[in-house]
Image (cartoon, rainbow, N blue to C red):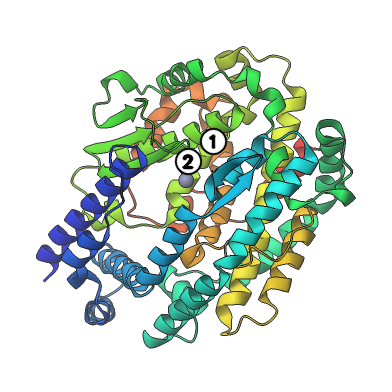
Amino acid sequence: MLEEYRREYADFNTRQMREYYLFLSGQKTGLELTQIYERYSDLFTREVIEQFQQLRQETPAHFETNYASINHLLVFATDQYMENTAKTLTEEISQYEAAAKIEWQGQEIPLQGAFVAIKAERNRAARQAIYKKRAALTEDANDLRAERLMKLHTAAQALGHKSYTTLYEELRNQDYEELSRQLQNFLEKTEAVYITRMDEALRRDLNLKIEDAERVDALYFANLIGFDRHFPADQLLRVYAETMQGLGIAIEKQENVEVDSAERPRKSPRAFCAPIRIPEEVKLVIRPVGGQSDYQAMLHEAGHAQHYGWAAADLRPEFKYTGDYALTETYAFLFNHLPFDSAWLTEMLDFRNHTDFVRSVMVSRLMAIRRYAAKFIYECELHSGNSLTNAAERYAELQTDATKFKTGESEFLFDLDDAFYSSSYLRAWAFEVALREYLKTKFDRYWWRSKRAGDFLKEIWHTGDRYNADEMAAQIGLGKIGFDLLIDEFNQKLK
Ligand SMILES: [Zn+2]
């Protein structure tokens, strides 16, 4: 069964990823996934899931590779099974969102565009007005989202699990209660420095005190548009090439990792990576607009692209296309973090007077991590029970407590990722500091200039998605992934 399954599985992933790539890069008007799902629906039935569970039980754990293989395939089948059960509602919601428009100053802006408008709107009253209209539209689809959520919960129980939470804990071999405790501790230990520095930054950039700040101000603040002139659009590709050159990666010779920078009207404004065939065909799609957030997004996606681009061709397909997202996100954050590096800013962008920028971008990063910590804690609560009573209030309360930006209830079902993706980001943020410190100690304080650091990265990227983030951290010798280094980093750099 396995050989044929693997072939079909690899085809499914490639076709699905190619469809996303063509759609998001503006080469295709509609995203047509239904056909692909129908064609490959045999890959993720309940029977298949049961067969993999059975197979896993029968495989002795000391046959590590075979055991990991079955586990990866089980993760894939379960993820897709869950997605498939909710598919009609997912489509209904996305159709609603694609059609929803708000009226603003005589113009119609789509829902997604409202976000972009808020991020660039200097006038606070205008920001608030757009946000209010957007919130009303979000609320209109909450019934559909609630229905979808209940469907997912029922599906998790139908697979024999107590709750949606326990399904993913078991599947991903994680202890979410323990992670929640660690995050609670992270929130406590970074609270004082966060409040002081965020208040300072808000007074300077927005003429606002932290006790008056709202979620809409956070969206605008995080964009840090005051520094955009230091990050010109026309230098983005050069900076990518030179950064990789420092690690001994000549991107112009790297035929399998293609930078798609073509200008197309419907192209997604946000950079993304599409690993269509790993490692033979990986796309790094960018539409340079400049600004620090554009640079961060591009470097982040470059981390994903290099990870998949250096995966060994002879890995089993399940070690290429299915893995622990925390692992690939760790590599993405490693590059994502370069604009926080004083020497890198000077060398790559000749940005010398960067003290204020580094502080602001650090505060903004701390806000993002605190926001995700609250998001994860909320998701655990939401997915452990079976009712939505108090969920909206809980969401608002947890988000407001963590970020200090007053957050309303309207996004309590919108601001959710499936399958605890938030936990992958959080574990990746924690792993990334440890990996970065390791590269600095072992190779060079300026690790991004070291060919030896590059060789090391290529070596670990070679294993693709074979290991989860915890296993990889242990193999490098970093021990268990924890949040202490991250807590220290914020307390030192923002003190
Ligand atoms: Zn990512």
Residue drawn at x 44%, y 77% is 152
| Residue type pointed to by label 2 | Ala
Give the residue number, with chain letter if any, for mark 1.
336
Image-based side of 306 in relation to 295, left or right: left
Badge 2 marks a residue whose secondary structure is helix
Residue 341, horizontal then vertical, whole percent? 63, 27
Quadrant of the rendered structure where residue 142 is? bottom right
- Is residue 29 visible in the rendered structure shown here? yes
Instruction: Tell me the quarter of the image containing the N terminus.
Output: bottom left
- The numbered dot on residue 51 is none
Horizontal arrangement in the rendering, residue 80 relative to residue 416 (left or right): left
Q: To which quarter of the image does residue 58 belong?
A: bottom left
Q: Position of residue 266 (x, y in %)?
A: 38, 36
| Horizontal arrangement in the rendering, residue 101 relative to residue 157 (left or right) | right
Circle 1 packing at 10 Å, graded few (<14), some (14-19), many (20+), is many
Q: Which mark is residue 332?
A: 2
User: How far apart, in angstroms, are the residues tagged by discs 2 and 1?
Assistant: 6 Å
Kindly state the secondary structure of the residue where label 1 is placed: helix
- In depth, the one of 463 and 387 nearer the eye is 387
Number of numbered discs on residues: 2
Q: Residue furthest front?
A: 106
Percent coordinates x, y for residue 394 in the rendering = 72, 72
Q: Is mark 2 within 8 Å of ligand 1?
A: yes
**Point 71% across, 54% down: residue:** 132
> Which kind of residue does numbered mark 1 sit on?
Asn
- Vertical order, 377 against 48 (above or below): above
Tag 2 near tag 1, CB within 8 Å: yes
Q: Of residues 180 and 95, which is closer to you in this image?
A: 95
Question: In this rendering, does residue 474 appear at all?
Answer: no
User: Could you say where residue 99 lies in the image, as x and y percent from the top left?
Assistant: 46, 54
